[in-house]
Image: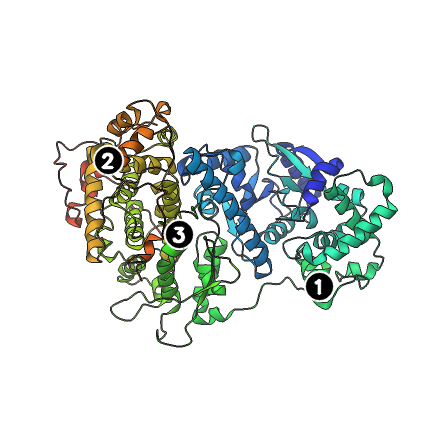
Amino acid sequence: MGVKGLQYFMDRCCPEACVTVNLRDMARQHVAKNQQGCTTTYNTTNPTLVVDGMACLRHWYSCKDWVCGGQWREYMDVLKSWVEAFNSAGIRLVFFFDGVVEEQKRQEWVKRRHRVNGEVSKMFHYLKAHGEQPGKELFCLPSGLASFTPFALRSLGQEVFCSVREADYEIASYARQHGSMGILGQDSDFIIYDSALYLSVAKLRMDSLTTVMYHRQRLCQTIGLTVTQLPLLACLLGNDVVSQEQMQHIRNNAMAAYRINSPVRHSGAPQGQMVLAVSHFVSSLRDREEQETGLIPQSLNLSAPQRELLKRGVHSYLLPGQEALQQDDMSALPSASAFEKHFSPQILKACREKHVAAEGFMVYSVVFEGVNECSNTLEDKENAELLPQALVYKPCRQRIYGLLLLHGHDVGSIDLPRIREWFVYSGNPLKEPDMVNPVPLGFPGDQPSLDFLWFSTSPEVSALRLKSFLLILDCQEYSELYGAIEDSLLAALCLVTYIVLQVQTLSQEDLDAYLSQAVCMRLKSPQELQQIKLPFLSSRAVQLGSLYVRGLNHLLGANCASGCPLPSAALMPWHSFDGRLFHSKYLLAHSGTEKTVLLDSDASCLSLFLCLREKLTETCRKRGRVLQSRPYVPEHRHKTTPGGVQNWRERGEMTEDHRHGAGWRERGEARGYPRESDNTERLWERGGGIRGGHFRPHPHPNCHDGGPQDMSRPPNCSRGSSYRNRGRYQLSPRWSHPSAPGT
């Protein structure tokens, strides 16, 4: 995350480099300056701000609730308002997101993942002790936020790019090449790149569109360096390429010399002293010819490997068109990998284009590098009853790899390609990647080629794409529901079925919570979702919510690999998941609530829910998976208003007056229900293992009852009784979508 100590130095020790600016004024000045020059080829009518999307996630996710899995529709509204604020000021936005983790930065990535794991553990400890969301000091981004935000911004009509190398480099390069008015982010690397102005998202005020600009030239004047010397300074201080430990001896020497030569300046903070000391050291290196060509001064006391590492670090800051880069380009894109030989040039081209345009997911890194990775997930490492999502979805990923890699190959070949997986979960030290074999999908005949699935226009290809998608999720039976129910609902049904098949400890109550949430979500406005009140929070429900969202990531990967039988929009969480809504359904289901109340006393939702549950139960039964009722009781003990939770359960309401639920817990104990903390052994190892607000009943304005219905049994779900022709089940027209992957 940038240069060690430099951001602190600029904020605390170098006020002259921190300039408060008004972005509206900057935009007007940028246009005027370009129009006066009349020589630029850039778009002078719309000044461009290049946005580091990853750095903005915490700024964007301002929703009150974050622990339950994400308030995705509310988040979409936040993004829309944010974009509109800049558009109204005449500022064009271009977003960049990390698309890969470069291997030279893998160890730094691992360190951060371990640190975040510790933060997640603290969050769960608080949650189980208090039954409520912790404060901002333990804030964690909802799982999957970085994956889905590019799709959200694209749906808002924004220009979004996913990087094929270090995102900071691509951001700085784009801003320099296109004459952008600035880079909005929170990474001190942007002061090192000789590119556009670096603007702070942490200090951004949306009401006035003001922020702090970090002035590169003023920083250089303060520390006595030129702009061309900043890359060497960054590497000696420590960054993502050159760790602090590797240059510790140079910093120690620099600090010792600084204290001797500048005794009056020792009153500053240690971080500030270190930046000044190393700056003085770099300035003392007089071999100007070597510095100007981008080489490392010979006077530095370095071993050969250290010198090579430092050279690589310095050159990582040199952008296209800069003289030193042209002489010795060590930062060029990596050469073709061994995996690329398995694919046609058309597949490689389409895969890269979709990835760069933020229209694909998972496929690019597998096709080009044979790597797949996933960051931290909100999972309780002390809960031995629930599998980590990385293991739950491993069979799904193996089939995705099989679809991508095994076409035209003998499955028994000893030269089968294996995927290197860097997935974060409890018990994985991340010292090396997991090597994962692709698994064939089990087509009755030959597996179709990827070129045919992605590019063919023959009549049978649509069915093959859908079949591939369903085979990856082990849900072939659901092909009859395609077109009969909404795409987002079909995706939710596939995902819940997969979870139930893989997680043997899931109960009937968990299934009811997942399905009722998906069914009711369709009829909820963002305002209604925000008004949901929860009497307490369950750590188990928190993990199940994150498990679902991570599953949507895998559905997206399966869809991209299969040639997109479903539109990507149908797989977005704001169409099928809300954290608070799911949590409320979980608490209701595990308290024994009647199904009518669970479905908001909506006859249409209840009928659809029963139909989908019957389909799912039948599919699972065919595979030997029979769900059992096993209500869970939350692990914490709190007092509550007498009868409060019981009344809430009967009404299907959750209010702030009944936030604590000891009464419910006590009734659960009397009935012999297990507690969520009763996880003394890993239940998945016993047998089976992994298979290889207020809820006020009201009619929805866009739905109309078709008369009395028999709620004792589910309706017929076959295509012959399509929901599209059944009153309240009237669905919106299907999205159109191209045949190439990732849309």
First along the sequence among labels 3 and 1: 1
Residue nearer the viewer, 661 or 289: 661
Image quarter for residue 660? top left
Mark 2, residue position: 592
Label 1 crowd bin: few (<14), some (14–19), many (20+), radius 10 Å: some
**What residue is rendered at 48% in x and 33% in y?**
81
State the separation of the CA atoms marked 2 and 3: 27 Å
Image quarter for residue 688? bottom left
Q: Position of residue 684 (x, y in %)?
A: 33, 55
Mark 1, residue position: 306
Q: Which element is circle 3 on?
A: helix
First along the sequence among labels 1 and 2: 1
Residue 382 disc label: none
The answer to whether 490 is drawn above or below residue 444 in the figure is above
Q: Which element is circle 1 on?
A: helix
Q: Position of residue 351 (x, y in %)?
A: 45, 60
Label 3 crowd bin: few (<14), some (14–19), many (20+), radius 10 Å: many
For discs 2 and 3, the disc positioned in front in the rendered view: 2
Q: Is 477 on the left-hand or right-hand side of 198?
A: left
Q: Position of residue 402 (x, y in %)?
A: 37, 66
State the separation of the CA atoms marked 1 and 2: 64 Å
Q: How is the model colour-coded?
A: rainbow
Residue 389 disc label: 3
Residue lying furthest right = 261
Q: Are marks 2 and 3 in contact (CB under 8 Å)?
A: no
